[in-house]
Image (spheres, helix red, strand yellow):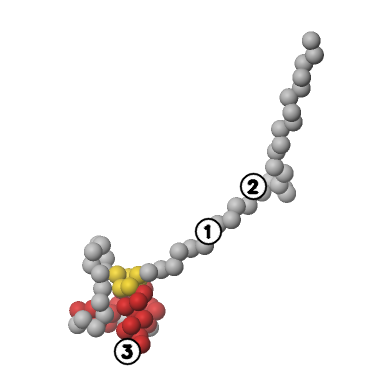
Amino acid sequence: MKDNPSPPVMVPVTAGNNPPQTATPAPLPRLAFSLRECAAMMGISYVSVWRLVQRGKLKSTGHLRHKLISKAELERFLKA
């Protein structure tokens, strides 16, 4: 009996020792920012942002451990 040779195995060829490149997904857009991030974006101090939240000028969510300010709220405040 004749032995049937198995088909050749296809191996991806890469240039050099580099692994094949995979496309990385685009980062998701930010929906909310911390008080420190808002302060940095607006060019004011963290304490000033905290005061704005305390006075009700900026609305924040406190559902998590840290307060967050939504992107829409920040845009609303900056337009006023």
Q: Residue 45, relative to residue 13: is it above or below?
A: below
Q: Position of residue 2 (x, y in %)?
A: 80, 14
Q: Tell me the residue that label 1 is attached to.
A: 25
Q: Tell me the residue that label 2 is attached to.
A: 19
- Residue 65 is drawn in which quadrant? bottom left
> Which numbered disc, 2 or 3, marks the residue closer to the eye?
3
Q: CA distance from mark 1 to mark 3?
A: 35 Å
Q: Tell me the residue that label 3 is attached to.
A: 80
Which amino acid is tagged 1? Pro
Which amino acid is tagged 2? Pro
Q: Position of residue 1 (x, y in %)?
A: 79, 10
Instruction: Check disc 2: other Cα within 10 Å, few if <14, some if 14-19, many if 20+.
Output: few
Q: Earlier in the sequence, mark 1 or mark 3?
A: 1
Which residue is the extreme one toward the top? Answer: 1
- Residue 49 is drawn in which quadrant? bottom left
User: 78 and 6: which one is in front?
Assistant: 6
Q: Earlier in the sequence, mark 2 or mark 3?
A: 2
Q: Secondary structure at mark 3?
A: loop
- Residue plotted at (68% across, 46% down): 17
Instruction: Check disc 3: other Cα within 10 Å, few if <14, some if 14-19, many if 20+.
Output: few
Left-right relation of 63 to 20: left
